Amino acid sequence: MKRFLLPVVSVFMIISCASPRVVFDKNTDFSHYKTFAYYKKDMLKAELGKDYKTVIAFETDHIIHSKGLKPSPNPDLVIRIIPSFHKRIDIYVENEPWIRRARKHKSWEGTLTILLNDAQTGKTIWKTSFYLRFDDKPELNRLLDKKLKKAFEQYPPGSKH
């Protein structure tokens, strides 16, 4: 059992620490994309608390604005934020000769995917996806800030940073 568990845990740790994965259309000229709007249905459907959705929306909006994109009712880009999270509950049992105690630890884990779609064609031209595990809003804020900055270093593709 231990022989099986160690490789599985090692792979999980490597995946959770990995940089955000970015994929983009190499044939797209990103220089003409100046405005954006959000597709909100994915966020509304997510099984995540309202506070966490607000943090995700705020952090994403902040990084999008920092890239020089402006909100518009007639956008060049449609941004889809797709959170796929579930609640995780870990139970730790402490066995002492005189007492047995169980502690419960609650957290959220899952994948956040951000798609930038051409508003005219609907085609996905840029995509990032990354794993997150967090306990509370401050931790989610910190993780999102770090992961989004890393992912959006590569937007627009070919730009020098």
Image: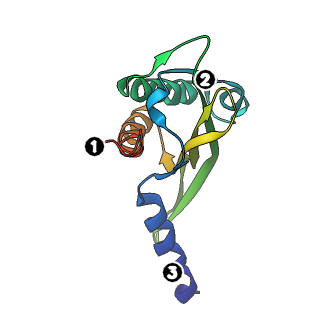
Residue at the spot 45% in from the left edge and 66% down from the top edge: 13
Residue 41, picture quadrant: top right
Question: Which kind of residue does numbered mark 1 sit on?
Answer: Lys
**Looking at this rendering, what residue extends furthest in the left direction?**
161
Distance (Cα) linking label 2 and label 3: 40 Å
Q: Which residue is mark 3?
A: 7
- Residues 37 and 75: in front is 75
Please state which amino acid type lies under the numbered disc 3: Pro
Residue 139 in sight from this viewpoint: yes
The outermost residue toward the top is: 73
First-in-chain label (1 vs 3): 3
Would you name the residue on which mark 1 appears?
A: 160
What secondary structure is marked by label 1?
loop
- Locate residue 6, reporting x and y percent: 49, 80
Q: Label 1 vs label 3: CA separation?
A: 38 Å
Distance of mark 2 from mark 1, alpha carbons? Answer: 26 Å
How many neighbours does mark 1 have within 10 angstroms: few (below 14), some (14-19), or many (20 or more)? few
Does the rendering let one see residue 113? Answer: no
Vertical arrangement, residue 111 with respect to residue 114, above or below: below
Q: Residue at x 62, y 34 (%)?
A: 117
Tell which circle, 2 or 3, labels the residue nearer the N-terminal end.
3
Q: Quadrant of residue 120?
A: top right
